[in-house]
Image (spheres, grey):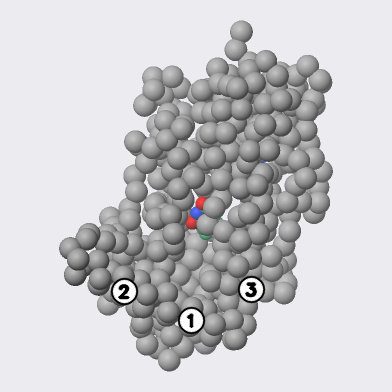
């Protein structure tokens, strides 16, 4: 008989884990707290490792990417109000694929729903676990149907908590959030624009990064941009008091560039937006008996790392591989899974601090240094492209 796994969360980590489990011959069941699947989302740059994991999970062919040619034109907005050619997220080494979060989830969903494979994974919406008991030989889970309030018990061979940064599975099986969530004293707000900012080409990206606060507009080849507002704060909890829009207006007042003003006006019209504090999740172990965490629940590297979606895909692909290789020994499989992933995750959790300075510099001197570094890198890149063009080599 197939072993059954409960996967909690229908995000990138949950769907990837379910596909990995299925590749290893398991029967996954996904529960999702929300009443339906979400779509859309914010800009995500998918790195080489994430694209490889997407291939391993069999979804790469369904992944719609939106890179503007050659990474697109990026404009850096200076304090003087000038617009200088700049470098953006897509100019990093490894040629990130430009997508919105919903593009990755849509590609995964084609396999989960059976549309691509003819083998659907069971998904229960409006359902969440309320108790998890590892009985040694299995896991007994009490599930609650959020629509009717009905509770029922069910037995599984494994539980995968892929329920995001504030994971309930983590809290139930590993302990309180404070033990694992590190506060980064920073906030983000992300939303989709209905159309490009006035006076810029459709696929342009724009960056205004000053000490303590920054606005990023991510351009795509075939859809309107998404916006990221991010700022540093000494009082994370206080940021949630009152209206998020009023808070952002206050924080970004004084950044006089028309792009910033337009972004704040667009935020007020946005049908939905994410407003949240920035954290990193650090855990000494990602599994305990028959309960395992994956994605942001286990290791959230945070948005500054630019690796959360990539790592969530890798978590699922590697889980499938480890379970295939140690089909009769779950402990050995989970051990191998963690030891393969941990160096990669640790590296990117550390790098995130440096990358945060590129997203939102911590002080005026860092802001100035950041500008110099980017100007030099931009000049080097332009010279290289010009040389390639003279030699007839495509960019
Ligand atoms: C603004 C922004 C920009 C980003 N940019 C990048 C980038 O460029 N590159 C990159 O790689 N990553 C990026 N990331 C990070 C990336 O989006 C996340 O790391 C990734 O989507 C996490 O996926 P996840 O499945 O672990 O968690 P989530 O996306 O949080 O999914 C968790 C799911 O679990 C469900 N759930 C929660 N609680 C329960 C419960 N109790 N029971 C049942 N279901 C539950 C939720 O409804 C949700 O569907 C960015 C993140 C943000 C916010």
Does residue 7 appear in the picture of this structure? yes
Which is closer to the viewer, label 3 or label 1? 1
* Percent x, y of residue 98: 39, 54
Residue drawn at 53 percent across, 85 percent down: 368
Tell whether 168 sits left or right of 320.
right
Q: CA distance from mark 3 to mark 1?
A: 19 Å
Name which residue lies at 69% across and 69% down. 185
In the rendered structure, which disc, 1 or 2, sits on the residue that comes first in sequence?
A: 1
Task: Residue 375: name its quadrant.
Answer: bottom left
Q: Quadrant of the C terminus?
A: bottom left
What crowding class fits label 2: few (fewer than 14 Cα within 10 Å), some (14-19), or many (20 or more)? few
Mark 3, residue position: 232
Residue under the image location 49 percent in, 78 percent down: 373
How many labels, in total? 3
State yes or no: Cβ of the residue under disc 3 lies below 8 Å from any atom of ligand 1: no
Looking at the picture, how far across and down is residue 182, in whole percent?
73, 58
**Foreground residue, 144 or 214?**
214
- Label 1 sits on residue: 371
> SS class of the residue under badge 3?
strand
Residue highlighted by disc 2? 382
The nearer-to-camera label among 1 and 2 is 2
- Which mark is nearer the camera, 2 or 3? 2
Q: Does label 3 or label 1 sit earlier along the sequence?
A: 3
């Amino acid at each position: 008989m197939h072993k059954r796994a409960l996967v909690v969360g229908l995000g990138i980590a949950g769907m990837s884990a379910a596909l990995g489990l299925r590749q290893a011959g398991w029967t996954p069941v996904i529960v999702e707290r929300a009443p339906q699947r979400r779509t859309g989302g914010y800009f995500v740059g998918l790195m080489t490792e994430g694209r490889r994991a997407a291939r391993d999970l069999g979804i790469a062919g369904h992944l719609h990417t939106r890179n503007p040619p050659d990474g697109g034109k990026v404009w850096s907005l200076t304090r003087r109000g000038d617009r200088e050619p700049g470098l953006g997220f897509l100019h990093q080494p490894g040629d990130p694929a430009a997508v919105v979060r919903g593009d990755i989830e849509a590609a995964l969903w084609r396999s989960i729903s059976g549309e691509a494979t003819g083998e659907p994974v069971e998904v229960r919406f409006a359902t969440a676990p309320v108790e998890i008991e590892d009985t040694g030989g299995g896991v007994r889970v009490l599930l609650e149907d959020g629509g009717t309030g009905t509770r029922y018990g069910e037995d599984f061979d494994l539980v995968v908590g892929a329920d995001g940064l504030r994971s309930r599975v983590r809290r139930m099986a590993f302990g309180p959030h404070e033990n694992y969530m590190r506060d980064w004293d920073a906030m983000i707000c992300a939303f989709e624009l209905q159309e490009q900012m006035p006076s810029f080409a459709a696929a342009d990206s724009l960056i205004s990064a000053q000490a303590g606060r920054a606005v990023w507009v991510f351009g795509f080849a075939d859809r309107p941009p998404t916006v990221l507002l991010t700022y540093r704060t000494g009082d994370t909890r206080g940021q949630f008091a009152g209206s998020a829009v009023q808070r952002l207006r206050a924080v970004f007042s004084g950044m006089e560039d028309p792009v910033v003003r337009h972004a704040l006006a667009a935020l007020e019209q946005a049908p939905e937006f994410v407003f949240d504090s920035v954290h990193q999740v650090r855990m000494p172990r990602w599994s305990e008996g028959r309960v395992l965490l994956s994605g942001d629940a286990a290791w959230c590297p945070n948005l500054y790392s630019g690796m959360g979606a990539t790592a969530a895909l890798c978590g699922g692909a590697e889980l499938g591989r480890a379970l295939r290789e140690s089909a009769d020994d779950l402990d050995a499989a989970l051990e191998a899974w963690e030891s393969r992933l941990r160096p990669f995750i640790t590296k990117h959790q550390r790098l995130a601090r440096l990358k945060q300075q590129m997203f939102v510099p911590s002080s005026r001197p860092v802001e100035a240094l950041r500008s110099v570094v980017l100007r030099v890198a931009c000049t080097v890149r332009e010279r290289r492209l010009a040389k390639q063009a003279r030699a007839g080599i495509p960019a």
